[in-house]
Image (tube, rainbow, N blue to C red):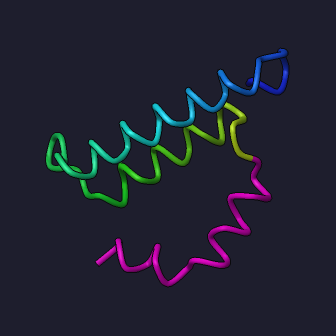
Amino acid sequence: MFQLIAVPELTKTLIASCVGVLTLIGIMTRPFRWNEAIIAMAGAGLLLVLGLISPADAFSNLYREWNTFFSFSE
């Protein structure tokens, strides 16, 4: 979304930080008794949809840190 319009880098950083903080709050409070993995995936999906991270960066991060991510699913 942000790749279609010109947005300053500071704005992108602030939005990504807000998404990260809201994701962490969601993981800690577990609203509606949701699983932590679902909340984390929603935060990551929002970053992808907004264009704040690229799919290639998301995949490479998942590839490097796969053991950390799979520990959340237990």
Tell me what residue is drawn at x 75 percent, y 58 percent.
Answer: 57
| Most distant residue in the bottom direction | 67
Q: Which residues are magenta?
A: 54-74
Tell me what residue is drawn at x 15 percent, y 41 percent.
Answer: 32
Q: Nearer the viewer, residue 44 or 34?
A: 44
Vertical comparison of 60 with 12: above or below: below
Can you give x and y, in whole percent of width and height, for residue 48 in the image? Answer: 65, 42
Residue 11 placement, left or right of 2: left
Can you give x and y, in whole percent of width and height, for residue 37 in the image? Answer: 36, 60
The part of the image, by quadrant, that contains residue 66 is bottom right
Vertical comparison of 2 with 13: above or below: above
Residue 38 placement, left or right of 41: left
Mainly helix, strand or loop, the magenta region?
helix
Residue 30 is inside the magenta segment: no
The part of the image, by quadrant, that contains residue 72 is bottom left
The part of the image, by quadrant, that contains residue 31 is top left
Residue 65 is inside the magenta segment: yes
Vertical comparison of 29 with 59: above or below: above
Tell me what residue is drawn at x 33 percent, y 47 percent.
Answer: 24
Tell me what residue is drawn at x 82 percent, y 27 percent.
Answer: 3
Residue 46 placement, left or right of 61: left
Can you give x and y, in whole percent of width and height, for residue 58 in the image? Answer: 68, 58
Q: Quadrant of the C terminus?
A: bottom left
Can you give x and y, in whole percent of width and height, for residue 30 in the image? Answer: 19, 48
